[in-house]
């Protein structure tokens, strides 16, 4: 028993030490959607670290709404309309939606895809429904096709998986501009048709009201605003 007590006390001491170290380090905790973290935020985060080496950033991901009042996050990045009661909201960038596929598939289907309605004869890739995000039905409506009968196709849990399937010649995906810039630039994906749907929701950085001027939060907020503006300009030039 004495040995078990010593082991318990040793473990408890380690836990307390870790908590004390974490408090002293005061990392900046940011929560965001999985796809946005992997495809947009993390690849750009190095420039923030270079400019602010004294600020330690911890990224966590969740596709569910985050309660900053009860969860241990300083900020969150979310898709929405920008209205979050009790939170300070900073606009980051808008999103635009269009179909994409691999260059291999685009080449093989070049004689079959003459107009947007031709996509209804192909295998479309779907993301498990996110009620706030534009869907294939929305894009076809933008293309002037109302109430289309969508073909069957595989469904994926998030945008990352859907885009990977598209790059693997598995079908045609509906992409968001914020998540496919690099793939379009290096040719891993090809945009089909010049019909671009403006998403009704945008990316926002949110934090509790009153905390937006905390030096670490302000530094990150200023950096990501500039990064979002640059990404928006790059997409405009790309199209």
Image (tube, grey):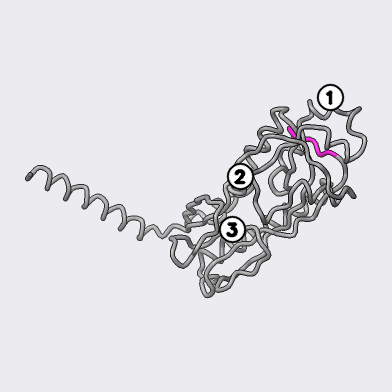
| Tag in front: 1 or 3 | 1
Label placed on residue 108: 1
**Disc 3 marks which residue?**
77
- Mark 2 is surrounded, within 10 Å at the Cα level, by few (under 14), some (14 to 19) or many (20 or more) other residues, namely few
| Labels 3 and 2: the sequence-earlier one | 2
Query: In the figure, 183 relative to 207: above or below?
Result: above
The secondary structure that most of the magenta stretch takes on is loop
Instruction: Report if residue 189 lies within the magenta region.
Output: yes
Which region of the structure is painted magenta? 188-192
Is there a contact, CB below 8 Å, between mark 3 and mark 2?
A: no
Residues 54 and 229: in front is 229
Between residue 128 and residue 166, name the one nearer to us: 128
Q: Cα distance, mark 3 to mark 2?
A: 16 Å
- Vertical comparison of 115 with 143: above or below: above
Q: CA distance from mark 1 to mark 3?
A: 39 Å
Mark 3 residue crowding within 10 angstroms, few (<14) / some (14–19) / many (20+)? many
Q: Are marks 1 and 3 in contact (CB under 8 Å)?
A: no
Horizontal side, residue 87 vs residue 96: left or right? left
Residue depicted at 66% across the width and 66% down the height: 82
Residue 30: which numbered mark, if any? none
Label located before the other in sequence (1 or 3): 3
Comparing labels 3 and 2, the label whose residue is closer to the camera:
3
Which quarter of the figure has residue 114? top right
Describe residue 190's horizontal placement relative to residue 167 as left or right. Answer: right
Point 79% across, 29% down: residue: 103
Vertical order, 40 against 220 (above or below): above
Residue 180 percent coordinates (x, y):
71, 42
Q: Is residue 216 above or below residue 86?
A: above
Q: What secondary structure is found at the residue carrying circle 1? A: helix
Question: Can you identify the residue that label 2 sits on?
Answer: 43
């Amino acid at each position: 028993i004495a040995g078990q007590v010593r082991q318990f006390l040793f473990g408890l001491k380690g836990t307390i030490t870790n908590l004390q170290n974490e408090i002293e380090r005061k990392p900046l905790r940011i929560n965001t959607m999985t796809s946005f973290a992997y495809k947009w935020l993390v690849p750009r985060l190095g420039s923030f670290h270079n400019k602010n080496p004294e600020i330690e950033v911890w990224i966590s991901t969740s596709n569910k709404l985050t309660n900053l009042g009860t969860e241990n996050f300083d900020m969150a990045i979310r898709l929405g309309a920008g209205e979050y009661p009790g939170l300070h909201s900073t606009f980051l960038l808008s999103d635009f939606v269009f179909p994409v596929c691999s260059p291999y598939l685009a080449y093989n289907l070049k004689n079959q895809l003459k107009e947007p309605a031709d996509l209804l004869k192909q295998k479309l890739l779907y993301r498990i429904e996110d009620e706030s995000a534009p869907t294939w039905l929305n894009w076809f409506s933008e293309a002037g096709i109302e109430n289309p009968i969508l073909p069957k196709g595989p469904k994926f849990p998030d945008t990352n998986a859907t885009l990977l399937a598209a790059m693997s010649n598995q079908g045609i995906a509906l992409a968001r501009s914020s998540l496919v810039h690099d793939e379009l630039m290096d040719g891993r994906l090809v945009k089909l048709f010049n019909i671009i749907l403006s998403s009704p929701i945008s990316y926002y950085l949110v934090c509790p009201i009153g905390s937006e001027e905390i030096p670490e939060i302000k530094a990150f907020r200023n950096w990501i605003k500039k990064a979002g503006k640059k990404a928006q300009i790059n997409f405009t030039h790309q199209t």
